[in-house]
Each structure stands twice: as C-alpha cells, then as structure tokens.
Image (cartoon, rainbow, N blue to C red):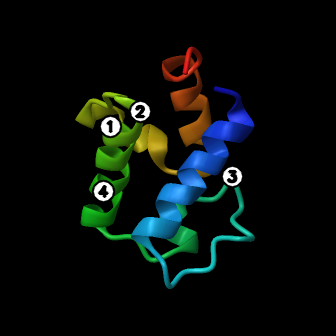
Amino acid sequence: MTPDKIRDEVLDILRDIAPDDDITDIDDEKSFRDQIELDSMDFLDIVMELRKRHRVQIPEEDYPQLASMASTVAYLEPLMKDM
C-alpha cells in the first residue's frame, strides 16, 4: 500500500471515530490530539480498526509512533507494503 493510500485509510478511520470533527485540513505534522478531539478510547479504536481492516498488529509500546498523520503513515508503510 502506498503512503497516500495509507493516509486515506487513516482518514477514513478518523471519519468513523470522530464524525463531528472536520478532518479535511488535517496537518500531517501536528499531533492528532492537537487537531481533533480524541480521547484514549478513540485512539484505541483507531488501533483496533487497523487490526480489523488490515490485520495490522500494533504493540502498545509503539502507540506513541501514531501521534500524527506523518508518523502514522511512516510507521504503517512497512507493515502494509504488500497489501
């Protein structure tokens, strides 16, 4: 999967989890939490949705690497390269 497709997939998940937030102008370098209202359960929902949709396993110690769109795409790219 390309970085652009991964980004689109993460945006789709964010739309499902935070339907009231406008994510059209999300800044890839800024933390998700600084841009949209995500609590810890919402963050876990993102991780669970990635697991459900793409069978991507993300260990808890790697959660900080999913703080922004840029870091999330960089983290997921090697895991999703063959999808």
| Dot 4 or dot 1, earlier in sequence | 4
Circle 4 crowding by C-alpha within 10 Å: few under 14, some 14–19, many from 20: some
Quote the CA–CA distance across marks 2 and 4: 14 Å
44 left or right of 72 in image = left
| Dot 4 or dot 3, earlier in sequence | 3
Quote the CA–CA distance across marks 3 and 1: 24 Å
> Secondary structure under badge 2?
helix
| Dot 3 or dot 1, earlier in sequence | 3
Camera-side mark, 2 or 3: 2
Residue carrying label 2: 54
Q: Position of residue 12 (x, y in %)?
A: 55, 58
Looking at the picture, which amino acid does disc 3 mark? Glu
Quote the CA–CA distance across marks 1 and 2: 6 Å
The residue shown at (35%, 33%) is 62
Q: Is residue 57 above or below residue 63?
A: above
Looking at the picture, which amino acid does disc 1 mark? Arg
The disc placed on residue 45 is 4
